[in-house]
Image (tube, rainbow, N blue to C red):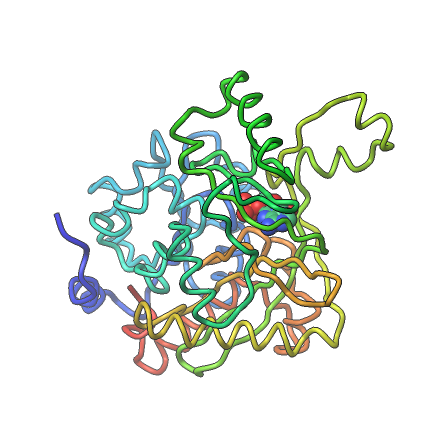
């Protein structure tokens, strides 16, 4: 089976009643404000849920239709896809949708019109592609070590797979790297394959800003809609323990996101924020046409030189946008009305329908 072609999606879209579009997504991640934003923009909404997971969408009243699946991954099943197409659904992909459906399935099997650019999702999922896009855009990333023997200062060691920030560790020499690897193997947290695929990068000591951008294809403009910083277990718990007790407790840090804080950045850093967003959008247009097309996020650390160092990107709506369901300081400046990322996406869809340009923003 090959990748789904844009022409196939356009063909499906041509049969849709454009006056009766449903905005749909998987019931997780950022579904609350995607669906809420859709209603604000006048769309009908649908959420795909495992039984028992529908409660937030029911209690907050954001979903008009519920589609139940045994397992989230069943969203790619043909009968579910058909139900979605029958309701003229445009699906908004988010991090959990991609994780549960599986990237291969999203690329090869999911024959439902989606907002954005399907092909860009792989560029966030594969570390080498992500690094290529960001560094070729001229944006600073943490230095990457290709050999643990070359570790000469604090580094962060990351492992692949779906374990989030679980089991990441910090070390500053090859000896310490080996020691910590052995410890983790003894706990069965990692195996030899993980060690082979370990990603080692410069540890950036700085403050965390996850910057939420929206690239409007219709207006050819990069917008900054909000920012958050991460609240991570158990590192944010460990830092509340006095140093001598930390040593005694011998806890291993993990970096699993459990929540987000809204944040604003020092105003003099905003030119850098816009510059990074503009550069990434231009590079993405070159590497994976038509480029970013919608929401994306650059996760940064601001170091002592007030330089934004990007350690990760999301090439779709990022979970930190939940910090501004009713708008952020920045979305207020831009729109002067409550504007979540979900609503912004649906505004773009509405504008595209009105201008007969839906094909430009659908994949
Ligand atoms: P990631 O899984 O890459 O999103 O990283 C999880 C968390 O680890 C981030 O939210 C940061 O707190 C921290 N982190 C990631 N990369 C670095 C780095 N190069 N230097 C310092 N902290 C980092």
Q: Position of residue 310 (x, y in %)?
A: 57, 60
The residue positioned farthest toward the top in the image shown: 186
Q: Locate the C terminus by quadrant.
A: bottom left
Query: Which residue is more in the foreground, 223 or 250?
Result: 250
Q: Vertically, is 309 above or below 334?
A: above
Q: Position of residue 194 (x, y in %)?
A: 42, 31
Q: Judge whether residue 60 can be spotted in this image.
A: no
Query: Which residue is more in the foreground, 98 or 128?
Result: 128
| In this rendering, position of residue 363 left or right of residue 281 | left
Q: Vertically, is 205 above or below 242?
A: below
Give the residue displayed 19% in from the left and 69% down from the top: 14
Q: Position of residue 160 (x, y in %)?
A: 44, 38
Q: Where is residue 223, by image quadrant?
A: bottom right
The residue positioned farthest toward the left in the image shown: 1
Q: Judge whether residue 328 can be spotted in this image.
A: yes
Q: Position of residue 121 (x, y in %)?
A: 36, 56
Give the residue displayed 40% in from the left and 62% down from the top: 132
| In this rendering, position of residue 362 left or right of residue 253 | left
Give the residue displayed 66% in from the left and 40% down from the top: 232
Q: Where is residue 175, by image quadrant?
A: top right
The number of numbered badges drawn on the structure is: 0
């Amino acid at each position: 089976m090959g990748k789904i072609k844009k022409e196939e999606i356009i063909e499906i879209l041509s049969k849709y009643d454009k006056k009766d579009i449903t905005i749909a997504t998987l019931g997780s991640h950022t579904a609350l404000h995607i669906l809420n934003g859709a209603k604000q923009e006048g769309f009908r909404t649908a959420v795909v849920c495992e039984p028992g997971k529908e409660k937030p969408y029911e209690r907050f009243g954001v979903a008009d239709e519920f589609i139940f699946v045994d397992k989230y991954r069943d969203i790619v099943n043909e009968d579910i896809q058909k139900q979605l197409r029958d309701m003229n659904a445009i699906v908004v992909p988010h991090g959990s949708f991609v994780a549960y459906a599986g990237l291969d399935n999203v690329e090869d099997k999911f024959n439902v019109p989606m907002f954005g650019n399907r092909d860009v999702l792989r560029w966030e999922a594969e570390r080498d592609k992500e690094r290529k896009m960001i560094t070729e855009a001229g944006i600073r990333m943490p230095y990457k070590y290709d050999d643990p023997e070359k570790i000469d200062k604090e580094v962060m060691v990351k492992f692949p797979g779906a374990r989030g920030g679980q089991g990441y560790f910090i070390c500053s020499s090859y000896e310490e790297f080996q020691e910590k690897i052995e410890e983790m193997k003894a706990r069965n947290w990692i195996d030899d394959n993980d060690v082979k695929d370990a990603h080692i990068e410069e540890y950036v000591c700085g403050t965390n800003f996850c910057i939420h951008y929206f690239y409007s294809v219709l207006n050819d403009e990069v917008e900054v809609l909000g920012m958050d910083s991460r609240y991570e277990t158990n590192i944010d718990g460990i830092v509340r323990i006095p140093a001598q007790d930390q040593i005694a407790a011998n806890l291993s840090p993990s970096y699993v996101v459990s929540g987000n804080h809204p944040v604003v950045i020092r105003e003099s850093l905003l030119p850098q924020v816009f510059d990074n967003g503009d550069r990434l959008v231009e590079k993405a247009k070159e590497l994976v046409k038509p480029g970013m097309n919608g929401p994306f996020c650059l996760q940064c650390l601001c170091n002592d030189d007030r330089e934004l160092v990007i350690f990760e990107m999301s090439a779709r709506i990022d979970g930190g946008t939940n910090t501004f369901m009713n708008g952020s300081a920045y979305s207020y400046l831009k729109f002067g009305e409550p504007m979540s990322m979900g609503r912004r996406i649906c505004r773009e869809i509405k504008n595209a329908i009105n201008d007969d340009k839906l094909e430009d923003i659908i994949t």
